[in-house]
Image (tube, rainbow, N blue to C red):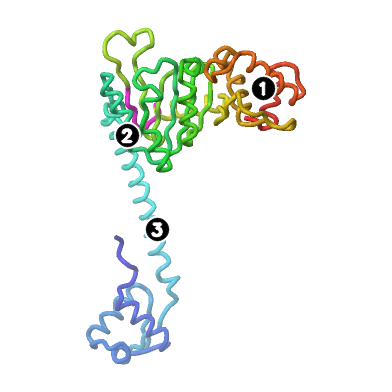
Amino acid sequence: MPESLLEPVEEKAYRLLVGLTAARVDQLADVAGLSPELADDVMLRLEAKGLVVRQGSEPVFRPQPPDVALGTALLRRQESLEGDRQLVAALSEEFRAVARRRDADHAVEVVVGLAALRERLRDLQQGAREEILWFCRANPLAMQGSDNTEEQDALARGVRYRAIYERALLEGPGELDSVREGISWGEEARVAPALPIRLAIVDRSTAICPLTHDRERHLGEPSAAVIGRGQLLDALLDLFEGHWLRASPLAVSGALGGDVAGAEGIGDAERLLLSLVVAGIPDKSIASQLGVSRRTVQRRLDRLMAVAGVDTRTALAYQAARRGWL
């Protein structure tokens, strides 16, 4: 730490001298409670710093303006501090650059084997504190949605889940029920026609992305990259957020065989139907997933188009977004 411009005893003597206007050394020693020798030494130091001047043969000391006396010293100190600040900044940047090069081989960890991959996914979810992001593609590699028992616990402790499901995944037997169960726990779900990769990101600090291509999933053990903070993780976060903006929201609940809403609105069952239709899932798959006939699906869609005042599904999707039905 830099030394003070004035030592405590010097500051005390100067303040007393300002109050006295002028004083001899013995007078100042008496008022300040100092020995004559120490008082004389302090006045010599203040004189050297330009804070006092002596007058007369039996010297009387008078105070001088501190901004004039100490201004130059303060300016030099500020210039020295600025130089030190720049030096610290340069050394810090050099340290970070070397650390990045030194730790580059630790930025990505490779996990090999189905059991190890499942365990890592479970560990990441159990340790999550804020948010988990998912790209859920068809034909999951390591964990089916129904096997993800950690999700409910994480949601219960306040972790936000945002999941984007590939359209083909929702067409699989029982998959929609599993997704709807997650939504009932608090998951935010959307549907996209296709997703580029499988991906999970925890607390925006760690991502896990399988390295095995779909066409090679049956050739040997699967592998995945666990990716820490850095530009690669930033790119994956941007990839997720871009797909999230374009994906279609998936409604929470509703049984299509239940009661319909009034003429001016729609109920949960119809919101669910709309979300599946907007996601591009065929009527046959919707009927199968919801346990109703295709005729029921088509009849409900006809009713929704009548409520919206349109005669095509494309126009219905537009009106659903415009009216906040999804």
Tell me the crowding category of disc 1: few under 14, some 14 to 19, or many 20 or more residues within 10 angstroms, Cα based. many
Looking at the image, tell me whether mark 3 or mark 1 is earlier in sequence order: 3
Looking at the image, tell me whether mark 2 or mark 3 is earlier in sequence order: 3
- Is the N terminus in the top left, top right, bottom left or bottom right quadrant? bottom left
Tell me the crowding category of disc 3: few under 14, some 14 to 19, or many 20 or more residues within 10 angstroms, Cα based. few
- Residue 59: x and y, percent? 33, 88
In this rendered view, identify the residue nearer to me: 290 or 97.
290
Question: What distance separates the C-alpha of mark 3 from that of mark 1?
Answer: 65 Å
The part of the chain drawn in magenta is: 225-232
- Whether 81 is drawn above or below 283: the answer is below
- Asked if the stretch drawn in magenta spans residue 231, the answer is yes
In this rendered view, identify the residue nearer to me: 247 or 50.
247
Residue at 33% across / 33% down in the picture?
A: 124
- Asked if the stretch drawn in magenta spans residue 230, the answer is yes
Picture quadrant of residue 256? top right
Picture quadrant of residue 35? bottom left
Q: Is residue 177 left or right of residue 14?
A: right
Q: Mark 2 points at which residue?
A: 97
The amino acid type of the residue labelled 3 equals: Gln
The amino acid type of the residue labelled 1 equals: Ala
Tell me the crowding category of disc 2: few under 14, some 14 to 19, or many 20 or more residues within 10 angstroms, Cα based. few
Q: Mark 1 points at which residue?
A: 317
Q: Mark 3 points at which residue?
A: 78
At mark 2, the secondary structure is: helix
Instruction: State which mark lies toward you, 3 or 1.
Output: 1
In this rendered view, identify the residue nearer to me: 12 or 285.
285
- Residue 215: x and y, percent? 37, 7
